[in-house]
Image: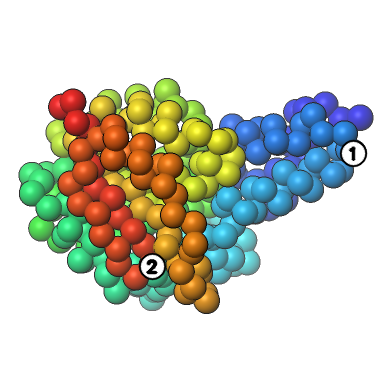
Amino acid sequence: MLSKQEILNKIKEKKEFSQLPEKDVETAFSHFEKRQTTDEDKVKLTRDLLRKVFSVFTSSKILSLKNKEEISSEKRYLRTLKNRSEEWILRKHISTRERIDYYEEIYKRILKDLNKKINIIDLGAGINGFSYKYFKKFEVKYIGVEAIGQLVELMNFYFKRKKLNGEAIHLSLFELEKIKSLIKKQKGQKIIFLFKTLDSLEMLQRDYSTKFLEEIVPLSDRVIVSFATRSIGKRERFKIKRNWILKFIKDNFKILNDFEIEGERYLVFENEKK
């Protein structure tokens, strides 16, 4: 019988999970840790759950920029991407692909009436940092927090190459105190993005979303959460309404905007006790 740490290490032997934070892997494993089954089954079940949470929005074409091309340095990475635009990257990621033609409109609506200089903390960023150019009239300091280490590296190389005021940080959203500390360190207006993120948090830990929002909303000037309203590919409308989290947000915070664009619903809100 393997120890808990040995099982966690075994789970991360799979390349797609090799750069996930230990906290995320441990949280997923907790669903199966006490199940009466073999260690092999626990590894498989945990990987299946992690795949549902992380891989559904992650294109293998993006991850293969390092793996398939055997890119082991910034120089090789830049050579690989030198003829590829931000749009090329955004279209290769399932989640951002759906926003590609609407980024300007989305950012215009969710950042309306803010100061010119803002801090954006994008939690569960994926590769959303590649949409930096769509901020247009704003002077943005962008911080993308992402669990998939390969995507963190891609964004950081991009920010450095383009000399942008951006940084990607490899961190689990279940490390709440570290997330709060990161938000508190920023000076000026703080805008939190949680694009298609709350559903993933709930898959790993039920009711974590409400606790998470209770802790971070008071630290920010504005929070934007989004939810997919249509299935990927088939574009069929989801029957699920997420009434519980929508009611929680409306009961505890001040709603500034609520709209849908191309299969994604955006809620813009702030702390009502400001």
Local SS, label 2: loop
* Mark 1–mark 2 distance (CA, rounded to whole Å): 40 Å
Local SS, label 1: loop
For the N terminus, the image quarter is top right
Q: Nearer the viewer, residue 146 or 196?
A: 196
Q: Position of residue 163 (x, y in %)?
A: 26, 54
Q: Which residue is mark 2?
A: 263
Q: Position of residue 225 (x, y in %)?
A: 34, 48
Q: Position of residue 37 (x, y in %)?
A: 88, 38
Q: Nearer the viewer, residue 199 or 135?
A: 199
Q: Residue at x 48, y 53 (%)?
A: 151
Q: Is residue 81 visible?
A: no
For the C terminus, the image quarter is top left
Decide if residue 247 is on the left or right side of residue 76. left
Q: Which residue is mark 1?
A: 38
Q: Nearer the viewer, residue 127 or 258?
A: 258
Q: Position of residue 131 (x, y in %)?
A: 30, 61
Please, what is the three-letter code of the amino acid marked with disc 2?
Gly
Q: Which mark is residue 168?
A: none
CA neighbours of label 1 inside 10 A, class few (<14), some (14 to 19), many (20+): few
